[in-house]
Image: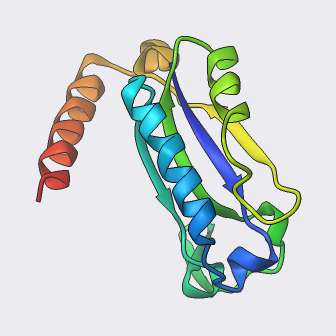
Amino acid sequence: MRFMIIVRADKNTEAGVMPSEKLLTDMGKYNEELVKAGVLLGMEGLQPSSKGARVRFSGAKRTVIDGPFTETKELIAGYWLFQTKSLEEAIEWVKRCPNPLEGDSEIEIRQVFEASDFGAEFTPELRAQEERVGAQMARNAKH
């Protein structure tokens, strides 16, 4: 089972405040533990929303909205991608995480859809297409 582990933004992450050396060190140790256990598939921190944009869809119309975005507590500051046997195992790993922000913070855990979750609508042709896209992504990641 794969899970996206989502770190919510706060006023500091949105202001572009970088983590302390201690937090970077603690996170580095935590990430090494995740890798050694075979849990960590990917991770990234995100720039503040002031450096981003949203595209709103309304039928065929597309509207671009430039950041920053006001609802800070709904924004994402970073994520990990875990592979574990269960939600409970993912929760146990997250509970071991250093607090990612100054003060209070919250980490959300969301299961990632697998091909088998989509049922008959996910035809053999669509499965083959997804496999081709996945293989190309893996090649792209090496460059």
**Vertical comparison of 49 with 79: above or below:** below
Question: In the figure, residue 35 lies in which quadrant?
Answer: top left
Of residues 50 and 40, which is closer to you in this image?
40
Foreground pick, 122 / 5? 5
Q: Name the residue at 16% across, 36% down.
A: 132
Q: Residue 77, percent across and down?
A: 64, 64
Q: Position of residue 1 (x, y in %)?
A: 50, 18
Residue 92 image point, x, y percent: 69, 23
Question: Is residue 104 depicted above or below 68 in this figure?
Answer: above
Q: Classify 137 as above or below 56.
A: above
Q: Nearer the viewer, residue 72 or 23?
A: 23
- Dividing the picture into quadrants, the one containing residue 21 is bottom right
Compared to residue 53, the image places residue 21 above or below, namely above
Q: Is residue 48 left or right of residue 134?
A: right
What residue do we see at 68% from left, 33% from top? 96
Front position in the image: 110 or 123: 110
Q: Give percent across and percent down for residue 112.
A: 54, 31
The quarter of the rendered structure image containing the C terminus is bottom left
Query: Farthest residue toward the right?
Result: 104
Residue that appears at 74% across and 45% down: 107
Name which residue lies at 38% across and 24% down: 38
Is any part of residue 104 visible from this angle?
yes
Is residue 97 shown left or right of residue 135?
right
User: How many marks can you see?
Assistant: 0
Residue 74: image quadrant is: bottom right
Which color scheme is applied? rainbow
